[in-house]
Amino acid sequence: MAMKKVLSIVAASAMAASVLAGCAAAPAAAPAAAPAAEEAKEEVAEAAEEAADEVAEAANGDLAGKKVGVCIYQFSDNFMTLFRNELESYLVAQGFDPANITIVDGKNDQGEQTNQIQNFITEGVDVLIINPVNSSSAATITDLVHDAGIPLVYINREPDAQEEARWADNNWDVTYVGCDARQSGTMQGEIIADLGLDAIDFNGNGKIDYIMIEGDPENIDAAYRTEYSVKALEDAGFEVNCLDDQVGMWQQEQGQSLVANSLAQYGNDVEVVFCNNDAMALGALQAIQAAGRVVGEDIYLVGVDALTEALEDVIAGTMTGTVFNDHISQSHSAADAAINYITGAGNEHYIGCDYVKATKDNAEDILASLQ
């Protein structure tokens, strides 16, 4: 079976399971609420097994000797830890020798990561999968890797539109696999908007007063989640008021410190806390509780990623909601794209996946699907 057809099967199977966000050609609206957890898990397991068999067959079992280099921007990132572990497991399941899969930690240092990429080029890897430290460095990275004749799969941190257009214009073996962060920001805003102004406007000024905790400003995901979460509220007809906007660099400790400072400064005027990821939201929750505030009673809190701890908080009511960033579908699609390049089947230059809203209505199902 042609590899492009295999990717289509993977995408269609993932879309069929409404707990797990499916891969598609472009971002789309969030799927409906998840079915029963056990049924969803069985569907996903069957789809994954079938897809794995098809990919292995298409590769003619000739992957064991192929070398894969994987660059992760920072191992300590919660989401990327889930992603890289699933990526490695899936690559092995497709027939790669574990000894030929090398995953390195960029330590959030673009210079360090660039050296790692150059080392992979010197070693003669067959494909590179890169989660860039700085998305703005994508053009330089692409030139390095393309000039070495190595196909490249970007993950998680999307290069800009101009860079992606360059791949298409030159018909290079370069693609991006990931979700559109605008969708995740929009879903955060919608989770809050769905509560209604009467439930949110604790201080009675007719506005939604919020603080924003952003991720790395070098990452386009942070910019989009910040912009589109607020835009969703405005599009829903709400008047908004930003009390504070700080950069937490995706870190839980910084999220806790920044939110503690904001709550000390603005007190009960803070009605909503937006965090660009769950790690910072978990830190924000610590600060909220330390300040004697209660999520769902006098303040609301949303994150992104649907980490296990965050989902447990959503279920308990100590977090208003999060957005499921599906590391399973994304990592599998990245591996399949790498296999496509190795086997000569090729890829589209953009392979997108959908986010899913995670609220108290479906958090248990999403959590069960990840266990």
Image (cartoon, helix red, strand yellow):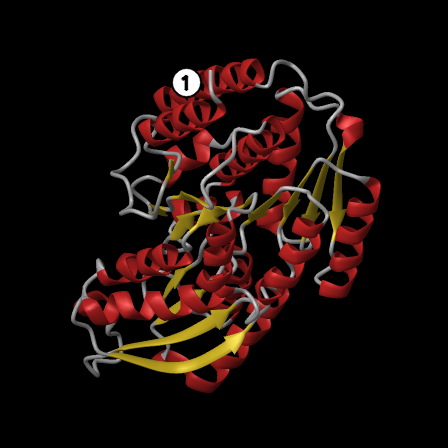
Q: Is residue 291 above or below residue 90?
A: below
Q: Which of 200 and 38 lies nearest the eye of the viewer? A: 38
Q: Which of 162 and 330 lies nearest the eye of the viewer? A: 162
Q: Residue at x 36, y 75 (%)?
A: 210
Q: Left or right of 206: which side holds 283?
A: right
Q: Which of 137 and 200 lies nearest the eye of the viewer? A: 137
Q: Residue at x 28, y 69 (%)?
A: 231
Q: Is residue 139 above or below residue 123?
A: below
Q: Quadrant of residue 269?
A: bottom left
Q: Residue at x 25, y 68 (%)?
A: 233
Q: Is residue 349 visible?
A: yes
Q: Residue type at mark 1?
A: Glu
Q: Residue at x 47, y 86 (%)?
A: 265
Q: Is residue 251 visible?
A: no
Q: Quadrant of residue 47?
A: top left
Which residue appears farthest toward the front when viewing the image? Answer: 170
Q: Left or right of 290: which side holds 103?
A: right
Q: Residues within 10 Å of mark 1 (few under 14, many from 20)?
A: few
Relative image position of residue 81 (x, y in whole percent): 64, 44
Residue receiving disc 1:
42
Q: Is residue 297 above or below residue 178?
A: below
Relative image position of residue 152 (x, y in whole percent): 61, 45
Q: Which of 135 and 230 lies nearest the eye of the viewer? A: 135
Q: Is residue 145 above or below residue 288?
A: above
How many numbered discs, if any?
Answer: 1
Q: Left or right of 360: which side holds 274?
A: right
For label 1, the SS is: helix
Relative image position of residue 168 (x, y in whole percent): 46, 50
Relative image position of residue 201 (x, y in whole percent): 24, 74
